[in-house]
Image (cartoon, helix red, strand yellow):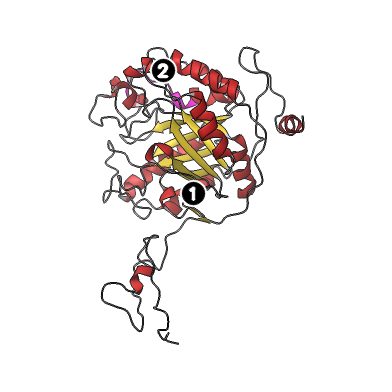
Amino acid sequence: MAAQTATAAMLGSHRLTATVRKEVYRATARSGRPLLELQQRFVDLRFGMFLHFNMATFQDREWGDPTSPLDLFHPTALDTDQWAPAALSANMTWACLTTRHHDGFCIWPTRTEAASVGRTSYSTDLVRAYVNSFRKAGLRVGLYYSILSLRDDIRHFNATPAKVKLIKDQLTELLTGDGEIDILITDGWDAPWSRITYQEVPFREIYEHVKSLQPGCLLCDLNASQYPSGGLYYSDVKAFEQNAGQKVSQDSDVPALSCVTLTDGWFWKQQDANGHLKDVTTVVDQWLEPLNRRHCNLILNAPPNREGRLAPNVVERLKEIGKAWKHPGPMPKLSEHVVITTRNLATGKPIHASSYPDTVGPDEANDGDFRSSWYLDEGKPRDG
């Protein structure tokens, strides 16, 4: 009863049809709130839906082919109003949609020169449809945006000022046209496979741009998990991709999210209609509940199909998850962590020591590799 009372106090009045769910865990508006409070409210959400839906959906690929004709993207029965009740049936509280994936196709009619639904015969603004549907259902909304864009040639060594401006212009569109966005998840940035560094597309500049548009929007970069687990490097919320083998440590106390797929891949494949789905025990007992005990919000990917709907087997599995797990209310209180948004100024700078062998040296202390270190042998004199 105490848990129910605590949860109810955070809800606020909202009516849903009985066929969906009678109670929804909701967070209050968050503009101008301290970062720690924003982080706490995010982890308190506990469980969300990732929606990978973009050009790759129509190609049976994990990355869209940037050379494909734009009209290939053409959902035949788009129904974002079906997505939201499916999330509610699993007792999810928020969602995140792939507005632009690595190939660079935008699923909103961007005013920039980039490839988008606005340049196709299917001109629906999917971002707005998604936001409206989920907000109407009492769910919080997040957006995913890839910094890497193959269609725009935003790659390692090619991130010109004009391309950085394109990124900022598109983020401005996404963060000014559809109301409050709880979290922006970025990807394709400072990743071993994209190699676009936080200097080429300057992290601090993008971070401040996002905050200037929406102070209450958290920024989470999916590739920042490569930095030490005990701190928040280049993210307000630390991300862990389970499909890539990234694990949240047992003693983690940073605000975190962990993303994983319900199907075998991120985007819908035609074989998924009768394919393997993760079972309820795996999702609830092995992922959701253990992660929640580590201040980690689980975001489970449920990809829409080429119609623009969630397939019947996906909808049914989400219902089964909701029968096995109920939202227990807020998480334990987070401790405060500084968010590091600028590069280490000491990295690569000349460094000397009074004595060291040829094969190792003090440069390993500031080489930018968190796995390396250097110290004087015991008993050696120290200058100064």
Left or right: where 136 falls relative to 257: right
Segment tinted magenta in the rendering: 119-128
At horizontal 54% and vertical 36% (from top left) the residue drawn is: 181
Percent of width and height locating residue 112? 36, 35
At horizontal 59% and vertical 23% (from top left) the residue drawn is: 324
Q: Quadrant of the C terminus?
A: bottom left
Left or right: where 243 falls relative to 332: left
Q: Identify the mark nearer the N-term, 1 or 2.
A: 1
View extreme (left): residue: 67
- Measured in 3D between alpha carbons, the distance from the residue under mark 1 to the one under mark 2, in whole angstroms, is 31 Å
Q: Amino acid at mark 1?
A: Ser
Query: In the picture, residue 104 is in which quadrant?
Result: top left
| Label annotation for residue 308 | 2
Q: Are marks 1 and 2 in contact (CB under 8 Å)?
A: no
Left or right: where 19 falls relative to 131: right
| Label annotation for residue 235 | 1
Query: In the picture, residue 305 is in which quadrant?
Result: top left
Percent of width and height locating residue 268? 36, 23
In the image, residue 76 sits, relative to residue 135, either above or below, namely: above
Percent of width and height locating residue 202? 39, 53
In the image, residue 68 sits, relative to residue 254, either above or below, namely: above
